[in-house]
Amino acid sequence: MNPGDGDLRGRTVLVTGGGSGIGAACARELAGRGAAVRVADIDGVAAETVATEIGGTAWEVDLSEVAALENLELEVDILVNNAGVQTVAPITEFPPERFRTMLALMVEAPFLLTRAALPHMQRQRFGRIVNVSSVHGLRASAFKSAYVTAKHALEGLSKVTALEGGPFGITSNCVDPGYVRTPLVDKQIADQAKAHRIAEQEVVQTIMLTENAIKRLVEPEEVASLVGWLTSGMAGMVTGASYTMDGGWSAR
């Protein structure tokens, strides 16, 4: 590869939620392009496992503890804000503390990490910020008030970052997948079955894929390939955008 393509040799990357699922796939993708990748995850063992596999470094961190991030300084060229959690419950039964924790993790933490990374990116006049959002950043689903709220907010943060970063050669974009074959989605199946009062085996087809034109789950590696392209030299004019990978869900 040449620098105009996807060659990331000499670049440093931070991937949050990198111990599994989409984050792990992104870490592998970017390391495969030559970047030095730091894998951040609340599960230190998982982070270390992925980091060892790709020749990167691990950072065990609970990103919902946002006060600890307020004075952070990050010297990374590429930031992938991916860490997230899900809770499925009606608004009337949604625990307020859980709502606050989810917004801290999926909105405030990306804000603080972006804030910590921008000075270095501005000094070198290059940066790539990729926010792993969701089709739920563009569309709503019942019983997911915190997740939908957080992802809509992340879309707004990404656009503001794009406007402020543009003069410094910094891009900021969202990747918006539908349901991805990850542990997060696997856990949802039982929760969705309970919330919708249907059998677990019905959840994937009647709930998760009902709006899709292509009736299958997204693979983590597919999301990672898009993230990889957004970090490349070929995507230098792509900023403030939201790229859906949802099998046609948002085409409706």
Image (cartoon, rainbow, N blue to C red):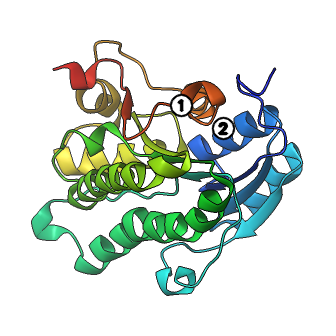
Figure quadrant of residue 44: bottom right
The residue depicted at 84 percent of the width and 38 percent of the height is 9
Mark seen at residue 25:
2
The residue depicted at 71 percent of the width and 44 percent of the height is 27
Secondary structure under the numbered disc 1 in the rendered image: helix
The residue depicted at 68 percent of the width and 55 percent of the height is 124
Disc count in the image? 2
Viewer-proximal residue, 17 or 229? 229
Mark seen at residue 145:
none
77 shown above or below 250: below
Residue 30 position within the rendered picture, expressed as x and y whole percent measured from the top left: 72, 38
Q: Is residue 210 visible?
A: no
Label 1 to label 2: alpha-carbon separation = 8 Å
**Along the horizontal axis of the image, is 57 left or right of 147?**
right
Determine the residue located farthest toward the top in the rendered image. Answer: 214
Determine the residue located farthest toward the left in the rendered image. Answer: 92
37 shown above or below 174: below
Q: Which residue is mark 1?
A: 223
Viewer-proximal residue, 188 or 242? 242
| Marked residue nearer the N-terminal end (1 or 2) | 2
Proximity of marks 1 and 2: CB atoms separated by less than 8 Å:
yes
Secondary structure under the numbered disc 2 in the rendered image: helix
The residue depicted at 67 percent of the width and 65 percent of the height is 43
Determine the residue located farthest toward the front in the rendered image. Answer: 167
Residue 64 position within the rendered picture, expressed as x and y whole percent measured from the top left: 48, 75
Amino acid residing under circle 1: Val
Amino acid residing under circle 2: Ala
Task: Report crowding for label 2: few under 14, some 14 to 19, many 20 or more residues within 10 A (C-alpha).
Answer: many
Tell me the quarter of the image containing the C terminus: top left
